[in-house]
Image (spheres, helix red, strand yellow):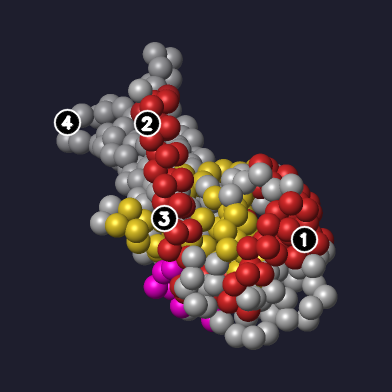
Amino acid sequence: MKFVDEAIIHVYAGNGGNGCVGFRREKFIPFGGPDGGDGGAGGNVWLLADEGLNTLVDFRHQRVFRAQRGENGMGRQMSGKAGADTVIRVPVGTVVFNTATDEEIGDLTAHGQRLLVAQGGQGGQGNMHFKTSVNRAPRKATPGQPGDERELKLELKVLADVGLLGFPNAGKSTLVRAVSAATPKVADYPFTTLQPHLGVVRIGPDQSFVIADIPGLIEGAADGAGLGIQFLKHVARTRLLLHVVDIAPLDGVTDPVAEIRAIEKELKGYDPKLLKRPRWLVFNKADLLAPEERDKAAKAIVRTLRWKQPWYLVSAIAREGTWPLCLDIQRFFDEQRREAGEAAR
């Protein structure tokens, strides 16, 4: 299935039904008086988060959604039936914006969560409401109110605990394959990853986390170059970023330090808050260097960057060093949960 993470839809809530002008007509009751009923309320439009969905591709085919109109009021003080609601299923992680105001309406982050995006109109009042001591036979009723009409932008941000960053061909997809059952495409040319991939890393019976692989970034990404900037929103929810670096570039001239700083520049251009998030360096492709050179090269980069956060030396393709990395990630999340629990208490 094609991955689609943005969509524009139009939603129309139901109009309210009109009030009724009616009079009681029964044998032996010549002056029954007004008995026109109220119109029914129009149906609402809701969004419902569904964990069974993982893309917005369905909205490429259907973009207009309408709720049912309320029925008109009737005689004998009978109110019209309310219009049926329309429920639109969307993936968990969908953010909803009003395109007219660019305002965020809501963020659906849990399965079963509902969000009202268009309110149905109220039904009109029948003439029984307008009877007074001086107007015993009113012929006045009010029309139903119109329902809301909105154009919405849906933006999907995948829910993952760990997000991978790095230049094309740094080995992000290989790392995801090494630590999870996910199978993103791997090849020896850039931009093999064209859409985000999620993998579940299982450490123990009750210990696991979700890792997200996004397309590689290049310089100028914050200005629209390349593919990765289109998907950076998918790491916006992550609690930990892994910055994957090719420690042994095949061309012999690429500088890993320059690449790391280039990615940091693009993160700052996209959202400066991402730079403040926990970010670990993962030096990949260590198998291409002699054992005595690996640690030396990694430490040289760390010293040049004055790096203070954790860093790791791995070979994703050979699965060397990946398990200790996963264990440390799980410990990091366990510690976060423990601290959150203590703060709550």
Span shown in magenta = 179-185
The residue that disc 2 covers is: 341
- Mark with earlier residue (1, 3): 1
Q: Residue at x 49, y 77 (%)?
A: 318
Give left or right: position of 329 versus 249: left
Seen from the viewer's position, the closer of residues 308 and 147 is: 308
Residue that label 3 marks: 327
Q: Mark 4 or 2 closer to N-term?
A: 4
Residue kind at label 4, given as amino acid type: Phe
Q: What's the residue at 41%, 51% (across, down)?
A: 330
Q: Position of residue 231 (x, y in %)?
A: 63, 63
Q: Which sits earlier in the primary sequence, circle 4 or circle 1?
A: 4
The answer to which of 117 and 297 lies nearer the viewer is: 297
Circle 4/circle 3 CB separation < 8 Å: no
| Residue type indicated by callout 3 | Leu
Point out the frontmost of discs 1 and 2.
1
Badge 4: residue crowd in 10 Å (few <14, some 14–19, many ≥20)? few
Name the residue type under label 2.
Gly
The amino acid type of the residue labelled 1 equals Val
Q: How many marks?
A: 4
Q: Is residue 259 left or right of residue 344?
A: right
Secondary structure, magenta segment, majority class: loop
Depth check, front residue: 129 or 218: 218
- The residue identified by callout 1 is 257
Q: Label 4 belongs to which residue?
A: 28
Label 1 secondary element = helix
